[in-house]
Image: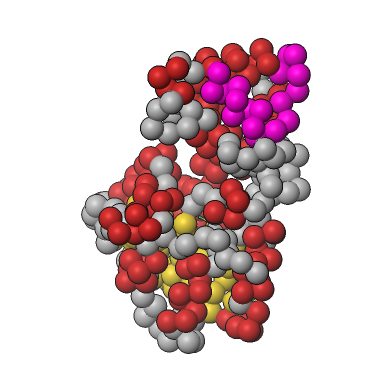
Amino acid sequence: MEIVHIPVMYREVLEQLVPKAEKAILVDCTTGEGGHTARFLEKYPSLKVIGIDRDREIQKKAIERFKDYGDRFTPVNTWFNDYLAKAETESADLILFDLGISVFHYVESERGFSFRKDEKLDMRLNLDSPLTAEVVVNEYPEEELANVIYQYGEERYSRRIARRICEERSAEKITSSKQLADIISQAVPKEYRYGRIHPATRSFQAIRIEVNHELDRITPALEEAIRVLKVGGRVGVITFHSLEDRQVKWFFKNRATGDDPLLSILTKKPIIPTDEECKENAPSRSAKLRVAEKRRSV
Ligand SMILES: C[S@@+](CC[C@H](N)C(=O)[O-])C[C@H]1O[C@@H](n2cnc3c(N)ncnc32)[C@H](O)[C@@H]1O
């Protein structure tokens, strides 16, 4: 089993999320291949991890990786917001979110997450869901598609891209990531086509977010997370773009004000990766870590 994902800011995460009790429980809401979980299990021999991931394929890798840890690693295959909504109040010492998708999804999943590959347009984390990227791209009305690309991709050429997709799909169904990437490249102005990032980057991000309803899960999950945390427990969130970070920032701020605030914010400014980490692990470049501690019962 090959591990392809390098955990982002794991040293900083370990520094911030320190268990106060010996037999502490960490809920890793986005376990993936288990990069962060592995560091916690190694560092704290009595710590137990509940490892959430909606994607059963990547979760198989984590299960294999931690098979010798017995009941110290408990995988749960569900969305993190659903798990937390049902979890017992004040049952976790630490809760970690490392949002988005993993390198596995780009390089191994064969689900069309990467515009550099020619794969079926799928992009689902939940393989039982009927909503695939192919459905979004071929069936959404033009305006709705443009809105998705604009809102979740912050793509300034969203209208042009949506128009072009709709023209192309009326001639032939769009079924592959390469086909979609080529259509997007054709839709944008030449100077943008050869710019700093691939012209399809933002649209692919947007479609993936839509398929998995990623942004709708963050604030509800944080709301539940602070109920599930023990008093004195900590929640850490790593985000990768401003739409995610904004939600975390405002949520923490909101719960950390007033006469008897629920949270203390431990990261006035978010922690970002060192230059060295950015060089060694390109996907970490846009990461931000925010951490808060629960001060009292909800
Ligand atoms: C950035 S990766 C985590 C990487 C992991 N921390 C590591 O270092 O190996 C995010 C993982 O969370 C999963 N995921 C994303 N959103 C989720 C959600 N709302 N509920 C459950 N799992 C989710 C993805 O399938 C992916 O495996």
Q: Position of residue 26 (x, y in %)?
A: 49, 72
Figure quadrant of the N terminus: bottom right
Q: Position of residue 145 (x, y in %)?
A: 59, 23
The answer to whether residue 27 is above or below residue 190 is below
Q: Nearer the viewer, residue 91 or 116?
A: 116
What residue is shown at x 54% (from left), y 74% (from top)?
Answer: 49
Q: Nearer the viewer, residue 39 or 196?
A: 196
Residue 27 appears in the figure: no
What residue is shown at x 59% (from left), y 29% (from top)?
Answer: 181
- Decide if residue 296 is on the left or right side of residue 36: left
Please say which color scheme the image uses.
Answer: secondary structure
- Within the displayed image, which quadrant is ligand 1 positioned in? bottom right
Residue 275, quarter of picture:
bottom left
Q: Nearer the viewer, residue 71 or 11?
A: 11
Part of the protein shown in magenta:
169-186
Q: Position of residue 152 (x, y in %)?
A: 49, 33
Q: Nearer the viewer, residue 245 or 10?
A: 10
Residue 44, quarter of picture:
bottom left
Q: Position of residue 85 (x, y in %)?
A: 58, 57
Q: Main secondary structure of the magenta part?
A: helix
